Image (spheres, rainbow, N blue to C red):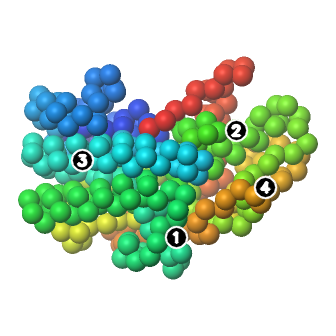
Amino acid sequence: MKITSKKIFVAGGRGLVGSAIIGCLKDKGYCNILVPSHAELDLMDQNAVNLYFEKEKPEIVFLAAAKVGGIVANSTYPADFIYQNLMIQNSLIHQSYVHGVKKLLFLGSSCIYPRDCDQPIKEEYLMTGPLEPTNSAYAMAKIAGIEMCWAYNRQHNTHFIPVMPTNLYGPNDNFDYETSHVLPALIRKFHEAKQKNLDSVTVWGTGTPKREFLHVDDLARACVFLMETDAATTLDLKKPLINIGTGKDLSIAELALLIKQVVGFKGDIIYDRSKPDGTPQKLLDVSVLTSLGWTSQISLPDGIHSTYKWFLNQTTGSGLRCCVI
């Protein structure tokens, strides 16, 4: 495969999404990838980002850096979520324009859509209703990032593409109980319950909300596909928006049962109905992406098996590496 010398900056390259994008780029022969650590570059510091872009001159930017978390983290630290994400986005999107970046891909989240959206969720449903209160601060930051990409495209003819992934999981995920999303949290819960020979595992909420899950390696392939293909230019580049998902969902109860089986836990599952459920359903309509020629490849059972295997490799005794974007 031809090696390309395009200089690519992956913001958030040490997190779940960024590390997967880097892996995909390397697999496809890209060799000039910029992945500065936080010590090397504070993404919330616009002046530092300006100096970095001035020095390195990246041609392509994947904006995968973000402060992310589940219901607990979003409910507890809403100011942190909106402030940090806005600062990161403002720095990277603006400096990409200033320094003539050819293409930028901005990663949002399916939580940008209204809480009670029609299902499956089409890109056109953005801002047609109230957000889910438990993560509205994070969602508003991401919506601002989308509008910022659109505004720069309209005013400056940039090629900035916002994409909206569904719920993600996979290697380098965050398994911390306080800040993780539901799938990695359940993997850890069932694993520790199995290790301790517990009789049951408690899951937040009723188990009835439905969620769609995409393996992060599939997301990475979709992101690189969109940056490589000219098919994306068939969209309205003044206001592009592309959902990335599998087009399939399942209930939290079904997810818990699947993870229980993968881990090999023999006890019961108990639902704590005093805890919030969050949005009733989040299933993305992925017909736009499918029309461009891309579909997901990794099934949920296979993805959970590989993620649990990765989790086991990171666990030594009672220690656990918890990775955060």
Q: Which residue is mark 2?
A: 188
Q: Which residue is mark 4?
A: 272
Sequence-wise, the earlier of marks 2 and 4 is: 2
Q: Position of residue 308 (x, y in %)?
A: 66, 39
Mark 4: secondary structure:
strand
Mark 3: secondary structure:
helix
Q: Position of residue 85 (x, y in %)?
A: 36, 46
Graded by Cα atoms within 10 Å as few (under 14), some (14 to 19) or many (20 or more), the crowding at tag 3 reads: some
Instruction: Please give the name of the residue rendered at 24% of the width and 47% of the height, measured from the top-left corner.
Output: 90
Residue 103 visible in the shown view: yes
**Label 2 vs label 3: CA separation?**
35 Å
Sequence-wise, the earlier of marks 1 and 2 is: 1
Instruction: Please give the name of the residue rendered at 74% of the width and 46% of the height, measured from the top-left corner.
Output: 262
Label 3 sits on what residue type? Asn
Q: Which residue is mark 1?
A: 115
**Label 2 vs label 4: CA separation?**
17 Å
Instruction: Please give the name of the residue rendered at 60% of the width and 47% of the height, measured from the top-left corner.
Output: 72
Label 1–label 3 contact, CB within 8 A: no
Q: Which residue is mark 3?
A: 90
Sequence-wise, the earlier of marks 1 and 3 is: 3
Instruction: Please give the name of the residue rendered at 46% of the width and 72% of the height, measured from the top-left corner.
Output: 130
